[in-house]
Image: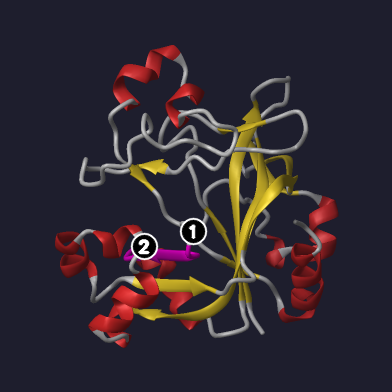
Amino acid sequence: MKVAMLRVGIDAGCGGIQGPLFQDGSFEYVPIPNGTDIDPRTYEKLVGRHGRPLIDYFPYSLKSKMIYKSAHVDPEFETFTYGDPTRPKAGLRKLEKGDMLIFYCGLEGWDFRCDPGLYLMGYFEVKTAGLATDYSSDEIERIFGKNFHVRHKSRFDNEKYQLVLVKGSSSSRLLNKAVLISTMGKDKRGRPLKILSPEMREIFGDFKGKLSFQRSPPRWVNPEYVARAVKFMRSFE
């Protein structure tokens, strides 16, 4: 069994904000903005689990810029699919049935004071994964039809030879409560950065000392920590 960890969702560098974290530990998953307005799901139209349009979580200075911006809803937790055509994510095609893909994101206190941090927000119990070209047209539509990259034919046709697709089973979850995994550390130049906390290293391992989790390619949990990581993730609602 294999376990990969992947950062998703909006952040200060891609969208201009962190996702909102609430005092009770719940949160909103706010997708990154899409580079084009190809998708009708805008931040004005997307309503989060707390009943508010996602545009409400942007500061006034960004609202006019983002209100009609298409959101890149990927991963999606309606049918549990994820897709990416970029080289850093190519290794996810190696995921197999029974593996786990864990998602984390950047969140910041919304209705209370809490500095930005990195939080576990959901996971897929993998049902299937591979390149788009590994699947027939019927399979693409039936299995991955809700995925952002598949919904838009022109985009899919352009990306399909590099596009990695992952499908989660019905046991996959978008967590009800976010789980903090980061603490503040420093890079080689002494600049602050978010790293995996000591508590989380006991569960996921230390990734051979590569503890920076701010914006990184998928991280693969070392085999000796896989069972512990899976048990930990399955313990949450």
Residue at x 65%, y 59% (from the top left corner): 210
Q: Position of residue 209 (x, y in %)?
A: 71, 61
In screen coordinates, is 22 left or right of 228? left
Residue 214 in percent (x, y) is at 58, 46
Q: Is residue 83 magenta?
A: yes
Q: Total label count?
A: 2
Residue 189 in sight from this viewpoint: no
Q: Name the residue type under label 1.
A: Glu
Residue at the spot 85% in from the left edge and 62% down from the top edge: 202
Q: Earlier in the sequence, mark 2 or mark 1?
A: 1
The circle on residue 91 is: none
Query: What residue is shown with label 1?
Result: 78
Q: Residue furthest front?
A: 51
Percent across and percent down for residue 42 are: 33, 36
Query: Is residue 17 at all visible to an observer of this figure?
Result: yes
Task: Give the colouring mode of the picture.
Answer: secondary structure
**At 30% from the left edge and 43% from the top edge, which residue is drawn?**
34
Question: Residue tagged by mark 2?
Answer: 146
Q: Secondary structure at mark 1?
A: loop
Q: Are marks 2 and 1 in contact (CB under 8 Å)?
A: yes
Span shown in magenta: 79-86
Q: Counting other residues with Cα less than 10 Å from the Cα at mark 2, is it few (<14), some (14-19), or many (20 or more)?
A: many
Q: Amino acid at mark 2?
A: Lys
66 to the left or right of 167? left
Residue situated furthest top in the rendering? 60
- Which is nearer the eye, 109 or 137? 137
**Residue drawn at point x = 25 percent, y = 46 percent:** 39
